[in-house]
Image (cartoon, rainbow, N blue to C red):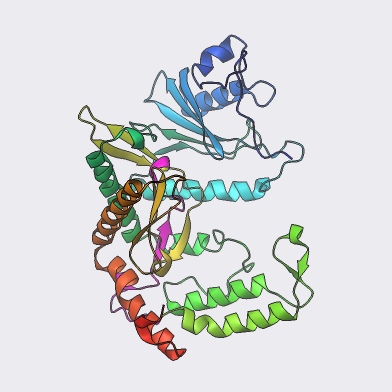
Amino acid sequence: MYYGDDWPSMPDGTPYDGKNLLELVRSGKSLFDGVWDVKLLIQEIEEKLKTQITGIPAVHKGSNNYGFHITSTSRPDIVARLAQDDVNMPEFDSFPLEVQVREVHFEMAVYNLLRSEPAILASRLLYGPIPHDITGRRLLVFEKADGVSNVWEDLTANGKLHLLRQLANIHAALFRYDHPQDFAAQNLLERLFKFKPNSLSMPVAPTRKFWMYLLESKIKATIQNEGDMIGWEDDNETVGPIALAAKESLLRAIPYILPVDKATVPEESLYRLVLEHGDFGIHNTAIAVDDDGKPQVTSLFDWETSCIWPALLSDPLVAAGPVDLIVGEDGQPAVTRLPEGATQVDLDTYAAWARHYIQTVIRAGKDFRHLCFFGKLGEWAENLMQAHGVIGSSAH
């Protein structure tokens, strides 16, 4: 089954080091021959950016895309991001082209929207069409920011804390960002995960009423009528009496799931519309390090999985080095994705990172994040537990 290109090997069988691709192409030794044509990528970029490519010093392989560092004659260095999968390949097994087209359009809209928000540091998009020559592959071209992504292990302890503070401030700036209402209206439904309604009969709004409606619609789209498919097609499951009963219970629970919004001004609302990055972490940032080892974030990229949520569900998670730093179920800083073999010293270090990052992002987000995670939601949770016969915070 085809999921994406294999990373090429050198003639001696060792993995390609990603260097000097342009020289290899010009000498007829492109390591991607037989999979896709690098010359078409070069031709498209040169034509659309009206420049001449002089070098491709490095190629990197991410989770879903190649990243090309490109130099040219008439502009600063650029980065081209090309999908590793081609929808024209036999046995292609991913999102169809029309879905990928919509995703590219949304991601381009995000980059253009955030261009005027310097605190968020979104990468500067230069070119992002539906591919014509690289048929079936998503292509975005950016102005290259200073720095690289993989610096965490080389930083000092203070350098890591300094970097975490910057990431927290960027995340908080994104949390505070008030995007245009028509942006949410045009994109919210499209960015929801399956399963979901085909359309919305209520206007998108930063209100509890709207999110109650959306949650109800999503439940009904997931569990339809008896005998209908439920879950993914490969599961071969249909709705039966148990699923129908669960559906009715979920629909009755909606008013208890979503807390009443007592905000007096819109920016404090639990249901204010927030743009989420979806994969926030140092792996999706460019970081420049000065001679003293002090890191500086210069760019936040890869908004492929971004979406629009109510502030209630905004996630302060950051992927930092070997772990993810999060707010736990108890509203306290926590760590997930722990590496195997972590020692107690490692665990104490990770916990310190989590406290430093989460406390910074809460402060940078001002009172609202504190309200969400430690204030009103805690009060609401207590009331909900009491309404269901559970005795306050002593019940664990």
Which residue corresponds to the image point at 55% horizontal and 23% vertical from the top-left?
42
Q: Does the magenta stretch include residue 316?
A: no
Q: Residue at x 36, y 25 (%)?
A: 76
Res 158 quadrant in image: top left
**Foreground residue among 48 and 231:** 231
Say if residue 243 shows up in the picture.
Answer: yes
Query: In x, y percent, where is residue 102?
Result: 58, 50
Q: How many labels does the image show?
A: 0
Residue in the image at 68% along x and 47% along y: 96
Secondary structure character of the magenta stretch overall = loop
The question of residue 270 being in magenta is answered with yes
Which residue is pictured at 43% across the width and 57% down the height?
A: 276
> Between 31 and 15, which is closer to the camera in this rendering?
15
Q: In this rendering, is residue 236 above or below 239?
A: above
Please state the horizontal and vertical placement of residue 22, each as a whole percent of the image.
Answer: 52, 16
The location of residue 383, given as percent across then percent down, is 38, 86
User: Which corner quadrant of the image does residue 274 belong to?
Assistant: bottom left
Residue 270 to residue 385: above or below: above
Give the magenta range.
260-283
Instruction: Give the x, y percent position of residue 357.
Output: 29, 53
Specify the farthest residue to the left: 292
Front-most of residues 267 and 235: 235
The answer, for residue 52, to whether it is visible in the render is no
Q: Is 50 on the left or on the right of 264, as rendered?
A: right
